[in-house]
Image (spheres, rainbow, N blue to C red):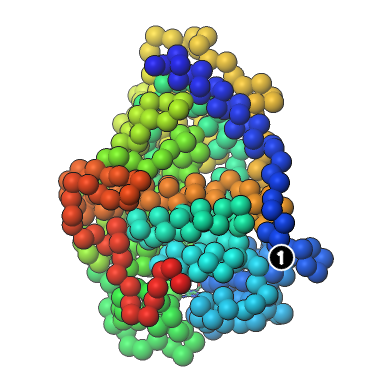
């Protein structure tokens, strides 16, 4: 198997790079941004916080609508985009007729809703990570995208993907620098100490539309601590994303970024088996400590592999005494038959191990086999809306990845190894109801709206 796979792996690498540089011919009438000055008409939903990191790129386009449930944040965004029509309800915002594309930076429990509603209206979507809050949300976003493939440009907000290290790591793995790939370990070091939803602190101030903040999920009492960023705009998610109804904690948060570094190098579909361990299951909060182990099916250039996510304490074993993996806050280790690659977002270390440490088995890529830089990640999506619809983290790629991550939370609650059939989206050896698999929504809220 290994020689055949290894030759397929090299052919695959070369053809992927060649396709990346290729030209796509689109049916007419699918491109956006062909109006005044070639600018794209964009709605920014969730207009402050993480959205601030998008403002610079968005200023080159027409932001025609902004939506935020917090009047103070809406006012900050309105000062930047004075011509945009303001909204507090994204469902009303999406009715505005001149919108061509949507950037969604709301809390996680709205992501799948906004993405699906927007795609159903023929709008291109950039959605912050994670794409969904449970297995079925990730699947639904991906399926809606696949129905619209060839018409819409989508991008999942894992902007670190633009670091050139991502493709260098993928080239090493796919090029055989560590032999046949066996195990991939990805981890993050953040922890939390919450055990229940924040207590009732009376009614929300008139500046916050709490009902709309809650949106599709179960009602919970307002507490101002949901709105207390500790490190400026874009850090407030750490005040709510450990609560099950609002997020998925690190497996969806930094897990999206770290797993993207792995996912880019393994060409994976979804797992066939998943088991997990960690803090005891708590219906209110996601586990702080978690380890999720997925068995990933073989593809046409590699055999079956194990893919493991660790957060909040558990860590993979060091491959080699002097390397202290705990000094890498967020990292990935790829283990092959002939060596190991340890990487963070910007750096990589290759450690040949075993008998063939002279590495004569490995041919490094020629300049024409090296993937070109992606450039600015958000701009890639804007350009894609106007040209070839191609992005590096579209909702097919990201949907499969987030579905895999969410299955870790399902297996944690189930407390046993689950067998999964990705084609049907069914767990085949268990019939439990798991919130990380399928969420219940408030009356009046439809995911596929
Ligand atoms: N890609 C990255 O590196 C990165 C970094 C930080 C955050 N994020 C993601 O961005 C998202 C937002 O995180 P944040 O820290 O900015 O959170 P946040 O709590 O500050 O919320 C962002 C904005 O959305 C608004 N909002 C809340 N509910 C809304 C609703 N129903 N409709 C419209 N607007 C609503 C808030 O008022 C706020 O202005 C999260 O999903 C997070 O995972 C991504």
Residue 260 pos. (x, y %): 48, 44
Q: Which residue is mark 1?
A: 40
Residue 359 pos. (x, y %): 50, 12
Residue 74 shows up from this direction: no
Report the side of 289 relative to 335 (left or right).
left
Is 292 drawn above or below residue 109 in the view shown?
above
Report the side of 408 relative to 187 (left or right).
left
The one nearer the camera, 271 or 405, is 271
Residue 230 pos. (x, y %): 46, 66
Residue 306 shows up from this direction: yes
Residue 145 pos. (x, y %): 51, 56
The one nearer the camera, 330 or 21, is 21
Is 279 drawn above or below residue 193 in the view shown?
above
Residue shown at the point (82%, 66%) measured from the top left: 37
Q: Say whether mark 1 is within 8 Å of ligand 1.
A: no
Q: Residues within 10 Å of mark 1 (few under 14, many from 20)?
A: many
Residue shown at the point (45%, 14%) measured from the top left: 3
Q: For the N terminus, give its image quadrant.
A: top left
The local secondary structure at tag 1 comes to loop
User: In which quadrant of the rendered view does residue 29 lie?
Assistant: bottom right
The outermost residue toward the front is 27
Is 434 drawn above or below residue 95 in the view shown?
above
The one nearer the camera, 292 or 401, is 401
């Amino acid at each position: 198997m290994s020689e055949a796979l290894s030759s397929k792996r090299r052919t695959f690498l070369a053809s992927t790079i060649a396709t990346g540089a290729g030209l796509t011919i689109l049916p007419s009438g699918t491109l956006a941004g062909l109006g005044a000055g070639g600018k794209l008409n964009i709605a920014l939903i969730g207009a402050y916080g993480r959205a601030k990191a998008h403002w610079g790129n968005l200023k080159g386009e027409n932001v025609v609508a902004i939506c935020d449930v917090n009047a103070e944040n809406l006012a900050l965004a309105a000062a930047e985009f004075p011509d945009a029509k303001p909204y507090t309800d994204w469902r009303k915002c999406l009715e505005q007729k001149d919108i061509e594309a949507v950037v969604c930076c709301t809390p996680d429990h709205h992501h799948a809703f906004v993405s699906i509603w927007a795609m159903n209206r023929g709008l291109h979507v950039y959605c912050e990570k994670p794409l969904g809050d449970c297995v079925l949300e990730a699947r639904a976003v991906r399926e809606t995208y696949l129905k619209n493939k060839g018409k819409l440009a989508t991008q999942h907000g894992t902007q670190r993907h633009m670091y050139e290290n991502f493709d260098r790591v993928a080239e090493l793995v796919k090029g055989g620098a560590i032999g046949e790939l066996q195990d991939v370990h990805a981890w993050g070091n953040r922890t939390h100490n919450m055990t229940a939803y924040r207590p009732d602190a009376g009614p929300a101030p008139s500046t916050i539309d709490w009902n709309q903040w809650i949106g599709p999920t179960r009602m919970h009492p307002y507490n101002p601590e949901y709105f207390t960023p500790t490190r400026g705009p874009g850090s407030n998610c750490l005040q709510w994303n450990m609560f099950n109804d609002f997020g998925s904690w690190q497996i969806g948060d930094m897990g999206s970024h770290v797993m993207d570094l792995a996912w880019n190098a393994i060409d994976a579909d979804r797992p066939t088996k998943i088991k997990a361990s960690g803090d005891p299951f708590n219906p209110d909060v996601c586990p702080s400590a978690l380890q999720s182990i997925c068995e990933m099916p073989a593809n046409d250039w590699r055999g079956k592999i194990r893919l493991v996510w660790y957060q909040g304490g558990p860590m993979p074993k060091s491959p080699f005494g002097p390397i202290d993996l705990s000094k890498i806050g967020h990292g990935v280790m790829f283990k092959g038959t002939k060596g190991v690659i340890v990487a963070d977002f910007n750096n990589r270390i290759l450690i040949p191990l075993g008998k063939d440490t002279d590495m004569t088995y490995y041919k490094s890529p020629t300049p024409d086999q090296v993937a070109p830089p992606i450039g600015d990640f958000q701009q890639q999506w804007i350009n894609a809306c106007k040209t070839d619809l191609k992005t590096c983290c579209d909702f097919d790629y990201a949907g499969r990845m987030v579905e895999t991550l969410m299955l870790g939370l399902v297996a944690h609650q189930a407390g046993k190894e689950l067998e999964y059939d990705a084609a049907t989206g069914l767990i085949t050896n268990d019939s439990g109801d798991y919130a990380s698999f399928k969420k219940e929504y408030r009356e009046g809220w439809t995911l596929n709206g």
